[in-house]
Image (cartoon, coloured by chain):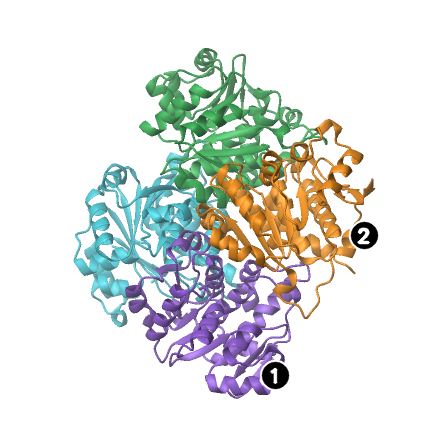
Chain colours: A green, B orange, C purple, D cyan
Amino acid sequence: MDQITKDIVNNTIRIRPNNSYKGTYGKVGLIGGNQNFGGAIIMASSAAVHSGAGLVTTFTDKINLSSLHDHLPEAMFADYNDEETLKSLIPTFNVIVIGPGLGTDTKSLKILNKVFSLIQKNQIVVIDGSAITMIAKHKIKLPNAIKIFTPHQMEWQRLSDIKINNQNENQNMIKVKELNSIVVLKSHHTEVYNSDSVFQNPGGTPAQATGGMGDTLAGMIGGFVAQFNNKYNAVLSAVFMHSKIADELAKDQYVVLPSQIINQIPNFMKKYEKI
Amino acid sequence: MDQITKDIVNNTIRIRPNNSYKGTYGKVGLIGGNQNFGGAIIMASSAAVHSGAGLVTTFTDKINLSSLHDHLPEAMFADYNDEETLKSLIPTFNVIVIGPGLGTDTKSLKILNKVFSLIQKNQIVVIDGSAITMIAKHKIKLPNAIKIFTPHQMEWQRLSDIKINNQNENQNMIKVKELNSIVVLKSHHTEVYNSDSVFQNPGGTPAQATGGMGDTLAGMIGGFVAQFNNKYNAVLSAVFMHSKIADELAKDQYVVLPSQIINQIPNFMKKYEKI
Amino acid sequence: MDQITKDIVNNTIRIRPNNSYKGTYGKVGLIGGNQNFGGAIIMASSAAVHSGAGLVTTFTDKINLSSLHDHLPEAMFADYNDEETLKSLIPTFNVIVIGPGLGTDTKSLKILNKVFSLIQKNQIVVIDGSAITMIAKHKIKLPNAIKIFTPHQMEWQRLSDIKINNQNENQNMIKVKELNSIVVLKSHHTEVYNSDSVFQNPGGTPAQATGGMGDTLAGMIGGFVAQFNNKYNAVLSAVFMHSKIADELAKDQYVVLPSQIINQIPNFMKKYEKI
Amino acid sequence: MDQITKDIVNNTIRIRPNNSYKGTYGKVGLIGGNQNFGGAIIMASSAAVHSGAGLVTTFTDKINLSSLHDHLPEAMFADYNDEETLKSLIPTFNVIVIGPGLGTDTKSLKILNKVFSLIQKNQIVVIDGSAITMIAKHKIKLPNAIKIFTPHQMEWQRLSDIKINNQNENQNMIKVKELNSIVVLKSHHTEVYNSDSVFQNPGGTPAQATGGMGDTLAGMIGGFVAQFNNKYNAVLSAVFMHSKIADELAKDQYVVLPSQIINQIPNFMKKYEKI
């Protein structure tokens, strides 16, 4: 299994063309954050904004509107319970991130199904957290779009039917091909699969073993694929960068918080910008 | 087309007279932020406060009260749906900024019309974002006041009927004279028109191509024209400063967020203060 | 007129005794922040906390609860519309600060009257902003307590019936004696009166001429008088420190925000701690 | 009485194993924050997150949801008034912290009783603030679990029936054995008891005599016992670290705020990590 290298990242994070505008960097819609897990979608949205997505809209429960705007005035709000809003807005995004803090109850399931029914062929959809769990449990038909899954090992077991102990490159690859998707299998050294290759992330620290890290990564991936043409390399770069920042911060910190990683994204992307 | 120079800015940002008080630096009312775009008016208001406006009141939907006060306790709140409030307060401001996150639905339109009907001749009104779109669409009569428009190229097309590809100095100037206004035409190198001259902004970086930048600029312009006598030079200086800060931050950041620019305004204004 | 000196401040900010606890540093209740001016009472409360008050409770409209707790989790909340709460809590404070963002409508007036009726003889009450305006307008009887007024010049005109142009040491002193209070008359060089002396503040910068500065000073005064025995010197020290911080920050900033001053209070108090 | 030493702390804060995940570091549920004291449970929760707890859920009044998520998106929310939620979630935690800002009214009492009835034998419960007061007042039966009490001297008087003046090692130890608990008796030099030993905290500064310090300590203890095997040493280390951070910050600050201590936890834990 190859390692994600600094070179891949360097070749992905292009120098922004002078004559560009926010539309150049993609419209990202993030969907999640029920009445208990509002923080998750705030972190994912903030990661997308700090990664450089051009325009970010957060679809969440109305109860999270105040904390979203205060924490991240750069994001726009949409009510994920309002079907008309979903219908008119979902098709307008380049990238959809669904799952952070979405929950798994009937309301969550309804939203997931509705969003999937609206997704267009040319859209990219990042599928995270409880969205993966619901897909596995309810055998939900996947949309005909560019799909990126970000399961941790237990979620991958649910989705792939491969027990954690049996999760190895060969077994995983069979399922990845079947899914016809990019799969980010999160663990101590995260592995990133697409249909014909797999890369392992060299970094990662136990200092980042804390709630919200996955939400942050999902948002970063959303922001990266919105901007960079080679989607697989964009995902590899987001995974690399996420743990690179954590590794650096962990030199001085026993724990690294998601919010701290998010704040460092613009600086670290600059360091790895294509020369 | 002349370039905005450091000299213009230096001659605009006067040393504050010792015997002055908050009233000296103007009362600014900012109007916008519907139930989806509350972040926009928070950023615009914060930019006005950080630019040194004496007193800032934010007219927005009540749903945005909490995030506004938490993010920016320096700003006062007013409910933009309350006509009595609009009637009693609008005439008391030196500067009105209308548009950031206002939206374009019937409620937004009603507010815009109401505010325009209340604006007095000696007031300055900065017209941004969805306010421009509504003016173009509904042929709204402009108030008899000192007007500053801040369109991006597509909004300028709507307002001026000049297609983006045909937007050049001559064509634009004809429309600017007709509007009898200052027009800040936002693009990679923003151009600032008044009836007898036009300046181009030398700065600007693709790192700032992200949502909320326009809202931030509108708030800065509001803050600058509230304080400095020569209104055209105040606008030129706000445009220059906005991109100057972004250019500096972009040396270390791949993306520059509106909130980060806002925080730097007091320091950069000090650097460019008249000697 | 004497100047407030560094020595007065040095002799006031005592070294905290080792064997002390939060009760040693006073209970401060701050009352204000209606549905439009919530930020004012947040800033005042934050200034009291950062000045070292032992326990801070903020009495405000329920609509401000979220922004208060998020901005300043150190403060407790109480609903200022709830008479039972006022009745049981008001007598428990060492210091009451009333006025920041309280407003002047009938609801505000009712709260002011209620609070004044509950204040005990040994309590200190700092009377600021709209509370002063209402006292002047409605000839409200002052409570029999230790009173500190913090008017700007127009509020002093309302309270004292001395026109701004006629406000001089002699005229002011007559009224101060009549009020039997400490009066902080805010202007470019703020003057602090008590019944037998008056001091002028040497510092102050036009960079601090922005909304919220008075609220911040009122909260600092509340925090200082809660901790230091000589009440007049505590007020002099708060006034001195408030502008000292602004003067320092203004070396690098064109404007100084109240929130920025508040954050510096603990560091500046340390610099001026009694040796 | 022995002193807590740097060695105890060094031997407690283990180097995190590489092959670990957030589940390794414990699930912590914090319960408190009524409609007046929401800030208390926010500070306690933030302290737990910054101490490295793997997953943090905050059980509080719904009115505190916005400020919680905005201040600390890393924490999940649960409504402490919803008995079904308590029933399904309480047994899933490794550590329960109950008390910060919980209040002492009938609603608070009901929640305390409900939570205690749900606690399992192998769970750790940190009992703080108003929870202690209610236990003393209503003679509440303690759960059969690993119990840690964090009273200040007055709360200890209520719980132990030992008057503050009579609180000495021998008297306290009798009651501690009866409680079969760890007891953190907070004072200038905090003492930490378990059934066969007692340690005194060498640090602590009067600069930290301000509201919210106890809530912060309770949250830190929750975070530490969730991660480190020797529970008594984990408590000793949290107590040591809490005042160590305050002592360091107090070198430059006259007052130290709970929020400032919280932000420093990850860095200080790193400094004391086992070598």
Disc 1 marks a residue whose amino acid type is Asn
Left or right of B95, for residue B204: right
- Look at discs 1 and 2 and give the one toward the viewer: 1
Q: Residues within 10 Å of mark 1 (few under 14, many from 20)?
A: few
Determine which quarter of the picture holds residue C124: bottom left
Asked whether residue B261 is in view, the answer is no
Which label sits on residue B7?
Answer: 2
Can I make out residue D150 in this image? yes
Say whether mark 2 and mark 1 are on the same chain. Answer: no
Instruction: Report how many numbered discs are placed on residues in the image.
Output: 2
Assess whether mark 2 and mark 1 are in contact (beta carbons under 8 angstroms).
no
Residue at 52%, 54% (x, y): give it: B87
Is C200 or D77 nearer to us in this picture? Answer: C200
Point out residue D256 in the picture as x, y percentages from the top left corner: 48, 61
Residue D234, percent from left and from top: 36, 49
Q: In the rendered structure, which amino acid carries the disc numbered 2? A: Asp
Identify the image quadrant of the C terminus of chain B: bottom right
- Residue drawn 56% across and 36% down? A49
Q: Which residue is mark 1?
A: C168
Question: Element at badge 1?
Answer: loop
Residue C120, horizontal then vertical, whole percent = 34, 77
Work out whether residue A48 or residue D196 is closer to the camera in this orientation and state it.
A48
Q: In the rendered view, tell whether residue D126 sits above or below residue B27.
A: above
Give how far apart the Cα atoms at labels 1 and 2 are.
42 Å
Residue C242 falls in image quadrant: bottom right
- Label 2: chain letter: B
Image location of residue B257, percent across then percent down: 60, 41
